[in-house]
């Protein structure tokens, strides 16, 4: 399931939904990304997430489909917010449910790593009264690369 | 064709979306970028360093050597930073 | 935080607590293990988790301490239930919060892998009207080994 | 010393916990196991295949070569299967 939305979500509900009505599930792995109170150049007041609406849904669906093809999963979820968010607020949730713990872990990790380099979202940070666009991290590229098929 | 700009490319060009006819002689993204750059001003600035510009044609990530045609939706943006 | 208990827990509450009042946290990773409806020899009616009370708390604290030493974490949690559980019921939850996504992921993965080979819990499955103790899995040993320091 | 048995070791020995004095000549876990095995019956059965028995002394996982002394808490159990 893919949700691109301005409003918040409930991680507990999402975990419950990943295994609801399916007692074949043995493990659910979830990652929640939050707005931190700091940026590279100091304290962060807020950030704004811009995205490319038409493409976002398509890209997230492709990422989810790829996870479902690679691992034996019972369910997956990706929720990504956009708009202005303050420190402590939830930005993103990815989750995977499987009969097998390793599959749930790897798929969840894969979802966030690929999302970070493929989903068209851009963060603008507000620090010290100034706004600036966040640069992409080389570590994110490296993290995503590990999932490339050999 | 429809051209979209995101993040700082939108701020530099001061355009979020525009519709134009495929400029003469343009066959690929690189050609389109050259044509946009030739407008000067914010457009020249936005594409000054092509190495940090990413592109999607019809909502798929592609390289600058990807073909473009009338009717395409072409989007320019910085490397993504969501998640 | 370590909780060894017979009663259920609320994953949503645990996720919230991992970052409560701490806007330095950028990522929370949580794994929830559930009772599956199948065992190696057929459909599973229920399972009973026995443990070694004095040692369990100590071992889980040691596992948590190890995670806190290895990764830059803001908070961790391990909850493990004991007693008789039915398919679909939650058994275990491990979670880690960090400023950094990789640290949260790796620490969470480490917690469950080490718990699986070091925490004194034993599962007895009820299948086809018979009861039998679950054998340890070689895959669990292999999963835990990857966290051994080189 | 206190001896604890868990899971199928408890079922085979039919004992979950017992207190005994350190048997004469016993210095390590292996010696203690030999003494318990010598009781025969369920004890002989429980320790028939020592390779699948794990041991903790004073609530720490140890090997069969670990020393035991009076006052120790020694627990025998199968490889753990929680989580």
Image (spheres, coloured by chain):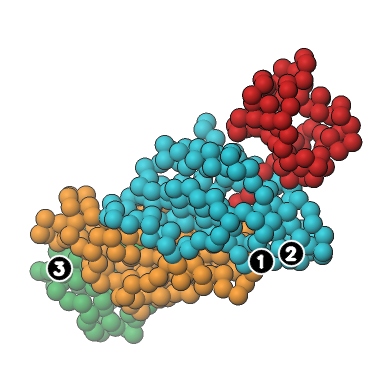
Chain colours: A cyan, B red, C orange, D green
Residues beneath discs 1 and 2 located on the same chain: yes
Which subunit holds the residue at mark 2?
A
Residue at image point 33% right, 72% down: C8
Camera-nearest label, 1 or 3 = 1
Image-based side of A46 in relation to A64, left or right: right
Which subunit holds the residue at mark 1?
A
Residue linked to disc 2:
A44
Q: Which mark is residue D12?
A: 3
Image-based side of A52 in relation to C132, left or right: right
From this viewpoint, which residue is outermost toward the right?
A: B41
Residue at image point 62% right, 58% down: C100
When the figure is inspected, residue A131 is found, relative to residue B70, above or below; the finding is below
From this viewpoint, which residue is outermost toward the top?
A: B25
Which subunit holds the residue at mark 3?
D
In the image, A76 versus D37, the foreground residue is: A76
Q: CA distance from mark 1 to mark 2?
A: 7 Å
Residue linked to disc 1:
A87
x and y percentages locating residue C139 in the rendered image: 36, 49
- Residue at disc 3, secondary structure: helix
- Residue at disc 1, secondary structure: loop
Residue C116 can be seen, yes or no: no
Quadrant hosting residue B27: top right
Residue at image point 42% right, 67% down: C11
When the figure is inspected, residue D36 is found, relative to residue A51, above or below; the finding is below
Label 1–label 2 contact, CB within 8 A: yes
Quadrant hosting residue D13: bottom left
């Amino acid at each position: 399931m893919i949700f691109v939305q301005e409003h918040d979500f409930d991680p507990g509900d999402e975990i419950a939904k990943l295994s609801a009505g399916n007692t074949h599930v043995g493990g659910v792995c979830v990652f929640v990304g939050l707005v931190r109170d700091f940026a590279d150049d100091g304290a962060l007041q807020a950030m704004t997430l811009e995205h490319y609406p038409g493409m976002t849904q398509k890209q997230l669906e492709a990422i989810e489909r790829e996870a479902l093809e690679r691992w034996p999963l019972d369910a997956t979820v990706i929720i990504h917010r956009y708009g202005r968010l303050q420190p402590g607020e939830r930005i993103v949730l990815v989750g995977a449910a499987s009969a097998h713990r390793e599959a749930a872990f790897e798929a969840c990790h894969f979802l966030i790593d690929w999302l970070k380099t493929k989903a068209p979202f851009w963060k603008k940070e507000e620090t010290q009264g100034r706004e600036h666009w966040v640069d992409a991290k080389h570590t994110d590229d490296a993290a995503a690369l590990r999932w490339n098929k050999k | 064709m429809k051209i979209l700009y995101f993040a700082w490319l939108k701020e530099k060009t001061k355009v979020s979306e525009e519709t134009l006819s495929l400029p003469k002689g343009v066959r690929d993204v690189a050609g389109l970028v050259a044509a946009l750059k030739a407008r000067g001003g914010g457009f020249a600035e936005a594409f000054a360093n092509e190495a940090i510009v990413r592109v999607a044609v019809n909502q798929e990530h592609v390289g600058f050597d990807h073909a473009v045609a009338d009717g395409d939706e072409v989007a320019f943006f910085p490397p993504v930073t969501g998640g």
